[in-house]
Image (cartoon, grey):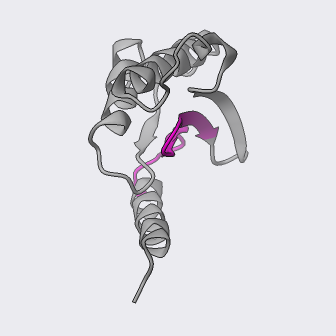
Amino acid sequence: MLTSKEKLLRRQDRNRYKLAARRNGLPRLSVFRSNNHIYAQIIDDTKRTTLVSASSMDKSMAKAKITATVDAAAAVGKMLAERAVSQGVDKVIFDRGGYLFHGRVKAVADAARAAGLKF
C-alpha cells in the first residue's frame, strides 16, 4: 500500500510528464502548498533555474497573520505575476504539482492571470 506522500509524488511525476509534452520552451509556474504557507516559482527547465519566486513568507507578506488562506494565496499569485512581468516573462505553463486545482492552488492561478500572466 502506498503512503499519501508516495501518492503525491506519483501525481507530481505524472503531471510534469504531461506538461513536458506541451511545454514548447515555456517556463513552468510551479506551486507548492504546505499546511501553513504557499510557495510559487517560475522555473526555466531548459536552464534549470528559478526565474521568479514568491511565497507567503516574503517580507511584503509580513502583515498577514494567517498565511494558509485563499486570500494569502491570491496575494502570492499577484506578487509572482508582477515580478515575472517586470522581468519580461508573460507566458508560462501552470504546474499544480499534484494538488487539485481547487482552493489555494486555484487562487494562485487566478491572481496570476489577473495580474498579467498568460497560461
User: Residue 38 in magenta?
Assistant: yes
Query: Is residue 109 depicted above or below 9 in this figure?
Result: above
Locate the C terminus by quadrant: top left
Quadrant location of residue 27?
Answer: top right
Residue at 65%, 27% in the rendered image: 52
Tell which of 63 and 86 is nearer to you. 63
Query: Is residue 15 depicted above or below 62 in this figure?
Result: below
Tell which of 111 and 55 is nearer to you. 55
> Can the viewer see residue 103 in this picture?
yes
Residue at 46%, 61% in the rendered image: 12
Locate the N terminus by quadrant: bottom left
**What is the magenta range?**
21-43
Query: Is residue 20 depicted above or below 74 in this figure?
Result: below
Residue at 63%, 48% in the rendered image: 45
Residue at 45%, 52% in the rendered image: 97
Percent x, y for residue 110?
A: 32, 24
In the displayed structure, does residue 82 sit left or right of residue 74? right
User: Residue 9 in magenta?
Assistant: no
Tell which of 70 and 107 is nearer to you. 70
Residue at the far bottom: name it.
1
> Can the viewer see residue 119 in this picture?
no
